[in-house]
Image: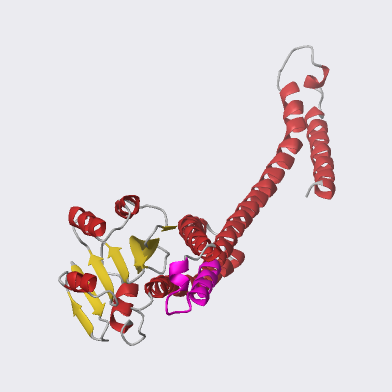
Amino acid sequence: MIKTQLLTSSGEWLTGNEELVSRWRADQNSYIWIDLNGEDPAKEKHFLLSMNCHPLAVEDVQRFRHPPKTETFDDHTLILYRGITEFNKDLTIQQMTIALFAGERHLISCHPRNSMGIAHYWENARHENLLVSPGLLASRIMRFSVGRYLEAILAFEPSLNELEDAMQEKPNDEVMRELIAYQSRLRKLKRIFSYHEKLVTNLLKDIPQRLIDEDGDIEHALQDLFERCERLHGLCTMYYEICGDLINGYLSISSHQLNNTMKVLTVITAIFVPLTFIAGIYGMNFDNMPELHAPNGYFYTLGAMLVIAAGFGVVAYKKWL
């Protein structure tokens, strides 16, 4: 579906469909926002090319799961990032690629499903007079999406604190499995946020002159967006490392417990090896064994075995246990 918002040179604000594009072309002082929501790929490609979007940029937009990026062409700047359609408490997410083409007098947004950021500014762009600044409007849309990520990540912190307390008080395999699952999901989120941080960094390093000349404070808007992306990446990295530390701590505790168990078993084995040796010798029953017919041989042997066992036990207790 293609829908549009047009701000004419006379200050008239119109909403409609594709038919407003021709009116925008005729009015050289007008501004337009064109939103392509779930449009057929072939029709979307044809429309973007008709708007003088670079063919390579169109290919990037339609490529499945293309990494977030930004690229500046002669008459427009492409911002390609990952928006979210669902972010659950267990950090499972549903995401989609959102493309924003910011030109001199137009903004084109492309997304396969409904986007909360685009829907929000579709209702508020007129009140904030953002159509005259396509680059600023694009940065605000991305900022809104990044803000949703930030809210979801901060909401995860209490759950992580509970897992940390549970791991310290009563570590078990169930908590361990949950931590491993969270660490895997945080790794994916960290990769996404790293892409977003690099995207905004590249924009800040070389802001297109077209965006600077707009009626809007694009430098501060991009700096604010960068700080949000940087915070997101930092929080995700910190939570990822906390999960890793808790997993390593659980493994260390398990290894220590196993070492203690093996130590006890080793001591028991060391005590019974000489006793088994003595029992093996006197259990052979050869005729030429002098001790075989000793009246008190059983008691002497049993006493020697008890002394040896007690001696080994005392030594093991003092040095190893």
As rendered, which of 315 and 188 lies closer to the eye?
Answer: 188
Q: Nearer the viewer, residue 275 or 129?
A: 129
How many numbered marks, from 0 up? 0
Whether 41 is among the magenta residues is no
Question: Is residue 72 visible to the viewer in this orientation of the structure?
Answer: yes
**Chief SS of the magenta region:** helix
Q: Residue 297's x, y, as percent?
A: 81, 28
Vertical side of 87 occupied by 172: above or below: above
Residue 87 vertical position relative to residue 183 in the rendered view, above or below: below
Residue found farthest to the top:
288
**Is 18 on the left-hand or right-hand side of 298?**
left
- Taking the spot 30% from the left edge, 77% from the top edge, the residue there is 29
Identify whether 293 is placed above or below 213: above
How far across and down, in percent of the image, does residue 110 sit?
29, 63
Q: In this view, does 224 lie above or below 73?
A: below
Q: What stretch is highlighted in magenta?
A: 209-231
Expressed as whole percent of the image width and height from the top left, the position of residue 96 reads: 33, 61
Q: Does the magenta stretch include residue 221?
A: yes
Does residue 282 appear in the picture of this structure? Answer: no
As drawn, is 181 to the left or to the right of 310? left
Q: Is residue 55 left or right of residue 225?
A: left
In-front residue for pair 131/1: 131
Q: Name the quarter where the N terminus is drawn.
A: bottom left
